[in-house]
Image: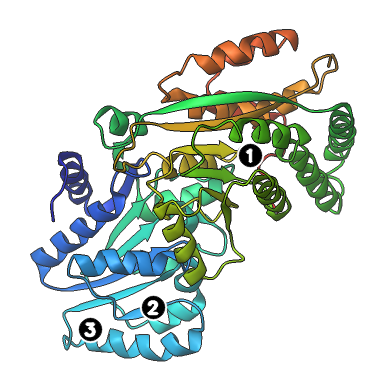
Amino acid sequence: MSLRPYQKDAIAAFVDNGSVGVLNMATGTGKTLTSIAAVNQAFAVHQRQCLVVIVPFTHLVPQWEQSLQSNGIYPDEHIMGDSVRWRGEVPNLVWQYQHHLIDRLVLIGTYKSICSEYFEEATSGLNDPDTFLLADECHYIGSPRSQRENLFQFRQRLGLSATPNRWWDESGTDFVRKLFGPDVFVYSMQKAIDAGYLTPYTYQPTIIRLDSEEMKEFEKLTKRINLLTTQEDKNPDIADAVKRMLLHRTRIIKSAAGKMIALEAQIVKQADPHFTLVYCANMKETEAVLHMLDEHGINAARFDSTLSLKQRSQVLERFASGEVCVLVAVKCLDEGVDIPDTRVAYFLASTSNPREFVQRRGRILRRAVGKQKAEVHDYIVMPPVDYKENHAEAVVRHELPRVFELNSSAMNKYAARGLLTPVLRQLQLERYLDLSPQDIYLESKRKRDGYDVTA
């Protein structure tokens, strides 16, 4: 296995921290290969190992299994889906390992199945110093349903993530840190681009104005939310109503009508539509984009949860070959799926969640033959041009952290500021130009904007 110098440094940092820690490495910089090398190094030292690999989604299991097998690691059991099958097999495998009948036990599965009482019960006999827990996208382990104390039985614990801290979730982040410890190694996207491991990119922001009806609905919801929030502590039943309104308000920004108009104008002018990716907010938007592309004779395919694993693989093959020009995706391309041929991406879904937009950017920056640079098109929602009321800040706080982060490593990083300055000046919100994404996040939290609320 050939490792880059920084990957060797990452493994050394993990070992120096007692073989517990997080590799905070930008998407596309080889976290998978680095972690497998760390696993093999531990096995070479001790000649025994019980390895458990956790991944976020079922479609990542075969991808990880292939990487493991390419480096001499062969999973004994898949921990996902029907628990009856593996619940009967895992205790037997653990018994064989504990009694030294096998020197290496490898289990791979999803967070949903491994972070469950069934897996805890199946591995209850496990007590060995050479246990190794490897968690891909380890921020998932901080979700309430994944927090299980039995995970601490693994003596070596390696977490992988470009975004290890959980969005708006201090208690979940605390669990991630309690289990995996600190970032023992950080390799930023800017470092990876500068070193030539990732593709340079340009950030192309477009201002989208809410129309009068959208802004009117946003204002109405904001006033109602502010009123109910003051009563929430006295009446817990109000919380559900507030959550519904917060979700509704966020959807107004995510699904602003002007985005589709701008997307159509830009994508049809694209010199070559091949290797293009469009991220949508929901299935309804996916259908609208597919219909629009079809009307313009652009061959496109959906990539979402409605497709089977086999269908997803086929779509990706057709995309890589050029048969499909445009992939239209909803969420399931966020993590783990390799699409290095992508040259252009349109972020129609205005997410405020750093985990989502950082992962989405990472999807298109992987190197590929003939690929010199990538383009990220982002749609920044703002109030109407003539808006003079006091609800503009809630819109701005939703959009700017994403804008500033995506812009920070771009080749044309000053373009976004030039575009935003007159808009924010007109709204008398120029002060946001001097705030960091973290500053805006904290302000949004103090103001109780509710962008942490998800369906």
Q: Dot 3 corresponds to which residue?
A: 97
Q: Residue furthest front?
A: 297
Q: Amino acid at mark 2?
A: His
Q: What is the tally of numbered marks visible in this picture?
A: 3
Circle 2/circle 1 CB separation < 8 Å: no
Which element type, helix, strand or loop, lies under badge 1? Answer: loop
Q: Residue at x 61, y 30 (%)?
A: 266
Instruction: Report the side of 93 relative to 206 (left or right).
Output: left
Residue situated in front as seen by the camera: 72 or 305: 305
Q: Secondary structure at mark 2?
A: strand
At 75% from the left and 12% from the top, the residue drawn is: 427
On residue 348, which mark appears? 1
Q: Residue at x 27, y 37 (%)?
A: 197
User: Does 377 appear above or below 242?
Assistant: above
* Mark 3: secondary structure: helix
Q: Quadrant of the C terminus?
A: bottom right
Q: Is residue 69 above or below residue 347?
A: below
List the residue tagged with mark 2: 78
- For badge 1, the amino acid type reads Leu
Q: Earlier in the sequence, mark 2 or mark 1?
A: 2
Q: Residue 129: where, in percent of width, then height?
A: 21, 70
Camera-nearest label, 2 or 1: 1
